Amino acid sequence: MPSLTRSRIDAADKLQQLLIESSPLIEEYTRELCPGCMDVCCRQKHGIYRERDVIYLKALGTAVPARDPARPLEVPCESLGKLGCIHPRRLRPFKCTWYFCEPIVLAMQDRPQRSARALTAIMEKMIRLYDELGG
């Protein structure tokens, strides 16, 4: 595992802030669409913390949540509660955080483009920072 350099710690701090900032923009859609979903996309396979996720959490001084290695990958994520994920967005695996199902994408297209552009701009910054964690 790569060492925790000052640049990785700084990238993790900035990434956390962007995740906090983006959460209300994403929840504008998930709050409306997810509760009535019949085909939950929150699968165990998306909730697995990968190397960059672990680097990010360690740079923040946060423990990596334990996962049940025996849980099948295609079943609903073990972190999925009655009201959505039990973890705040800033502590979720990035594969989970950055996944948008088709109904959410369609809803984004139906709303004023201002909010979609704001979220896209934040996501682009997050991707650059996420890349920095692995480099």
Image: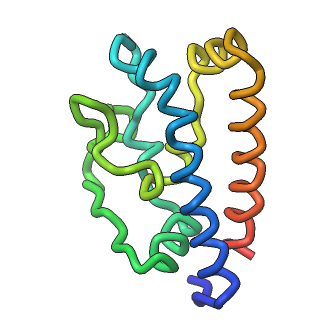
Residue 63 position within the rendered picture, expressed as x and y whole percent measured from the top left:
34, 73
Location of residue 92 in the rendering, given as x and y in whole percent from the top left corner: 44, 53
**Which residue lies at the image location 72% right of the left edge and 14% below the top edge?**
109
Q: Position of residue 71 (x, y in %)?
A: 27, 45
Question: Which quadrant is the N terminus positioned in?
Answer: bottom right
Residue nearest the viewer, comparing 54 with 110: 110
The residue lying toward the viewer, choosing from 54 and 61, is: 61
Q: Quadrant of the C terminus?
A: bottom right
Image-quadrant location for residue 69: bottom left
Q: From what the image shows, is residue 105 above or below residue 118?
A: above
Measuring 47% from the left and 76% from the top, which residue is drawn there? Answer: 60
Q: Is residue 128 above or below residue 8?
A: above
Residue lying at 51% horizontally and 52% vertically, measured from the top left: 20
Query: In the image, what residue occupies the spot 59% across and 42% down?
Result: 98
Quadrant in the rendering for residue 84: top left
Q: Is residue 131 left or right of residue 65?
A: right
In this view, the residue in front, 66 or 110, is 110
Q: Is residue 41 left or right of residue 82?
A: right
> Can you say whether 85 is above or below 21 in the image?
above
Q: In the figure, is residue 100 to the left or right of 27?
A: right
Colour mode?
Answer: rainbow
Residue 35 placement, left or right of 41 = left
Count of numbered circles in the view: 0
Task: Determine whether 106 is above or below 19 in the image.
Answer: above
